[in-house]
Image (cartoon, helix red, strand yellow):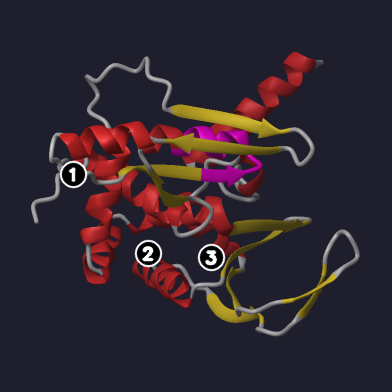
Amino acid sequence: MNIKKPYGAHHNCLRPALCYVLGVMKGDAYLRKQEYHPSRKAEVLYGARCKHYEKLSKWLVALDATDKEFVLKFAEMLEKVIRRPDHRRNDVALNIRTLKKENRKILYRYSRGVTFFAKWLNTLTTSEIHDIILENPAWFLRGFYDSEGNLYLKGWRANIFIYNTSLDSINLANECLNKLNIKHQVAIARPAGTKVKLPNAKLLITKTTLYAIRISGHANVSCFVHLVGSYIPRKSPLPYPNCDCPICTLLRSQKVVAKNECL
C-alpha cells in the first residue's frame, strides 16, 4: 500500500523537528482516530446509488501540559512536520484551550497533514523509527525530556530525572544518551503494586512499573544541558554555574541587564 509521507519526512533539514515530535509523543502527546457515522438519510442516499459507504474518520494529535511554552513549541514543530511552508495558515484546525481549575493547556491539532502523518507513522516498524531517532538523538531527548523530565535544584547542585512507564521508551532514551556520551543511571522508581496517596487523600495501587533515568554530577548535567537542553524555562538550569561557555556567558549577561533595567 502506497502511503503518502508527511512533508517533514522528505527533507533532512526537518528531521530534527520530526525527532522532537516523536520524543513528545513518547510522553504526553498522542494520536487518536475519530470515526463518524452517517445519518439515516445519507445511508439511504448511498444505498440508492449502489455505493459502498465507508466510515468517515480523521486523526487528531493532542497534547495535555501545564507549560504554555511547551505547547506552543510542540505546535510549531508539528507544523513543520505535517505542512508545506507555502500552505495557507488561516485554518481553524489548531486549538489551544486552558483549563482554569488545573492550569493546564491542551492542544488539539487535526488536518489532512495529521492524517498523512498518522498513517505514515503506523506503517513504520520499530527498527525504522529507531533509525530515524538515532539520526538526531539530542532532538528526541529534548522532546522526551520536555514531556517526561524534571529538574531538581539544591543550591548549585542539579539532578535531572526522566520518568516513563514504557521500558522500550526508556531503553531508546538510554541509547540516545550513550550516543551523546552522557553518563546516567537507569532504575525502577516505583514498582507495580505500590500504594500512592492522591491529593484527594485516596490510595491508588499502581498497575505498571515506573522507570527513571537519573543524570547527576556537574559534568554530566552540564553536558546534557548544552547538548540537549529544553524549551521549558523551569526545566533548563542555564546559565549553568561555574560555566564560562559562550551560551552561559551570554545568558548571564542578559539576566544582569534585565535586573538593572528593573531597578
Q: Would you say 257 lies left or right of 11 here?
A: right
Q: Are marks 2 and 1 in contact (CB under 8 Å)?
A: no
* Distance between mark 2 and mark 1 Cα atoms: 20 Å
| Pair 3/1: label in front | 1
Q: What kind of residue is marked 3? A: Asn
In the rendered image, residue 106, in percent from the top left (x then y), is placed at 58, 38
Is residue 163 visible in the rendered structure shown here? yes
Compare residues 118 and 139 and report the one nearer the observer. 118
- Say above or below: 89 vs 220: above
Which segment did they paint magenta?
63-74
- Quadrant of res 36: top left
* Distance between mark 3 and mark 1 Cα atoms: 29 Å
Precedes in sequence: disc 3 or disc 1: 1
- Quadrant of res 238: top right
- Say above or below: 254 vs 25: above
Say which mark, if any, is on residue 180. Answer: 2
According to the picture, the residue beneath numbered tag 3 turns out to be 220
| Residue pictured at 61% horizontal, 82% vertical | 188
Q: Would you say 261 lies left or right of 29 here?
A: right
Q: Residues within 10 Å of mark 1 (few under 14, many from 20)?
A: few
| Residue pictured at 30% horizontal, 55% vertical | 136
| Pair 2/1: label in front | 1
Secondary structure type for disc 2: loop
- Say above or below: 101 vs 240: above
Precedes in sequence: disc 2 or disc 1: 1
Asked if the stretch drawn in magenta spans residue 65, the answer is yes
| Residue pictured at 44% horizontal, 54% vertical | 25
Say which mark, if any, is on residue 89. Answer: none
Q: What kind of residue is marked 1? A: Asn
